[in-house]
Image: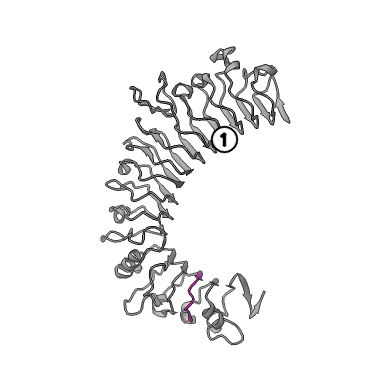
Amino acid sequence: MTMLRFGNSEHFEIDGWEEMASLSQHGFSLVGHRFISVWRCPQLQSLEAEEAKLQPDKISRVESLKIAYCDKLNRLPQVLHELTFLTVMEIDNCRSLVSFAENNLPPNLRKMKIADCENLEYLVDEKEDNKCPSLMSLSSKGHKNICNQLQFLKISACSKLSCLFSNTKFPIRLKHLTIWDCPELEYIAQEFQETACLESILILRSGIKSLPRGLDKLIHLQEICLDSCSNLVSVEGSGLLTTSFRAFVVVNCGNFGALPKCMVSITSLRQLSVCNCSADISFPSEGFPANLTSLAISNAPKIYRSLVEWGLNRLTSLQELTIGGGGCSNVVSFPEEGIGMMLPPSLTCIKLFKFENLEFMLSEGFQDLASLKGLVIDNCPKLTSLPEKDMLLSLGRLCIYRCPLLKEECLSDKGREWSKISHIALVEIDFKSVILGKSN
């Protein structure tokens, strides 16, 4: 058991008291502390007994509350909504917690983290009366405001959580929304508000089906990252017209089949990644965002075909290109021979993987790549040749993995391709570096 407590200190901390069911029975008080931490107290059920003896104004100085690994904690302190200075609250591994009552949440909360609360079903109990603004006011009884100061919301590993803001407006000052490992979470909110300050949306391994309407209202939005959300079908809305939007990432979402139609008009977009989604996903016919600096696609044959026909060289700012060839069984060369697809001169790194029938790399497509520093080729079992040496003079790193035929051709003693790559400072083949003709 480890326990730290200083009566006149701003910090109040208890850690690892397995038998403690309440604070008051051991003479502890929350009065006078600004930062409160209660960790690893598996018998602690609530702070109710202590609160009955406290006046809210005596503990209103509390700025941070962190509770973790308290398995029997079933409710939060009743006086939390009176703590006007409380800005940070973290609840972690409290398995008996089912909901947050509406009148239990402070009005000026800015950062909230909820993690590994496996029995949490909803953030606010709609049966509770809502008497003040709170973090998430989901009641259908008339109060639809949420904590106006909330800026960071992070929720993870809450396996029963099904919705966030069902009958309430989205927090207008929320900047960063992060959700992961919430498999039952299907719904975030009905609509984003015009005054919303949201800058980033990160959702990982969750049951979300779609994002709220009104993405085009988020003028501060910079990035959306959706990973391993198998129920996600599309991103609805009329567009992402913000001038701040920089990154759109959708990976491992097997049913995601449609990108926003307005993508080409987002001139601020720098990173686009669409990997391992529906094989039917295609890019709007209008084209691709012209100012991209990083593009990654895999298992998206329709997008790849659109790129070929549209012309990669039109992405004049592109620096990093990653292409996975899943579903592209007809591709035997990169760039494709006869189509005249030149690569952008701005490229600094190219990564190619899983092209099952790729046989050679077309030298003509690598012309004028004076800035190319890195080339990575992975799992292309039929590939036998690289571009001519003159096209690879700027390379500082070459990595070849799971390409048995190309590997043989790159051996220093007998490989036909060795002369093309002998000048490269770092050559790595099947995770072993090759330096000056010697394998390490």
Q: Residue at x 48, y 74 (%)?
A: 380
Q: In the rendering, at what x and y percent does residue 152 appear?
A: 47, 36
Q: Is residue 381 magenta?
A: yes
Task: Work out whether 391 lies above or below 122.
Answer: below
In the picture of the structure, the residue carrying the numbered disc 1 is 92
Quarter location, residue 294: bottom left
Say which of 341 and 344 sits in front. 341
Q: In the rendering, at what x and y percent does residue 20 appear?
A: 67, 24
Quarter of the figure with the C terminus: bottom right
Q: Residue at x 40, y 78 (%)?
A: 332
Instruction: Tell whether 35 sits left or right of 271.
Output: right
Please, what secondary structure does the residue beneath circle 1 have? strand
Most common SS among magenta residues: loop
Q: Callout 1, which amino acid?
A: Asp
Quarter location, residue 55: top right
Say which of 186 and 153 sits in front. 186
Say which of 129 and 127 sits in front. 127
Residue range corresponding to the magenta coloring:
373-385
